[in-house]
Amino acid sequence: MTKHMPHHFSRERETHLEEIGDYMTSPVIAIDSESSVKQAAQLMHSKQIGSLLVKKNAEFVGMVAESNLSHRIVGEGLDPETTKVSKVMTHDLLMMERSKNVEEANIFMARNKIRHLCVTENGKIVGVLSVKDLVSFYAHPRLRTW
């Protein structure tokens, strides 16, 4: 039996590292922390996204994702019309600078068991990188311009 040799695209990737800023979703879409979960779900549906950053005044204070909605609202039997986003959001925002490479972000997200990563530029959140974005990166190596 011969040893598996990686396809030349995967070998090339080692020398051509792409930045997460090229794959993130931007601009950031946010919702107020006092909004209802129903409003958050409707906004995510209309924008066809899986997460929203949560703002209180002018500051990002958390993130709400589809998993928060299903686990907390459905799992705990909360009312989506009266439950505030602040009650179900993830409070700790994990971030990475937009110039970091996609593979580094992939490893970071896997280690931290997160599906959405805030992307920053000079300390300011400018986008979100999702597992869906990573799938796009890894699924289409021939479409990349190296």
Image (spheres, rainbow, N blue to C red):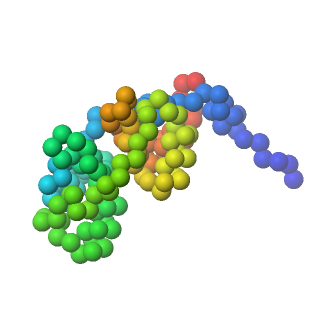
Residue 88 visible in the displayed image: yes
Where's the C terminus, which quadrant?
top right
Residue 47 visible in the displayed image: no
Residue 49 placement (x, y as % from top left): 31, 47
Residue 126 placement (x, y as % from top left): 32, 34
Is 88 rendered above or below residue 74?
A: above
Which residue is rendered at x = 72% and y = 41% of the image? 6
Q: Is residue 136 left or right of residue 87?
A: right
> Could you say which is closer to the camera, residue 57 or residue 79?
57
Q: Is residue 85 left or right of residue 99?
A: left
Residue 128: quarter of image = top left
Q: Is residue 121 left or right of residue 143?
A: left
Residue 4 placement (x, y as % from top left): 78, 47
Q: Residue furthest right?
A: 1
Count of labels shown? Answer: 0
Residue 120: quarter of image = top left
Q: Residue furthest top?
A: 146
Residue 24 placement (x, y as % from top left): 39, 37
> Could you say which is closer to the camera, residue 5 or residue 108?
108
Is 8 rendered above or below residue 70?
A: above
Which residue is rendered at x = 65% and y = 28% of the image? 15
Q: Is residue 145 left or right of residue 78?
A: right
Which residue is rendered at x = 49% and y = 54% of the image? 112
Which residue is rendered at x = 21% and y = 58% of the image? 86
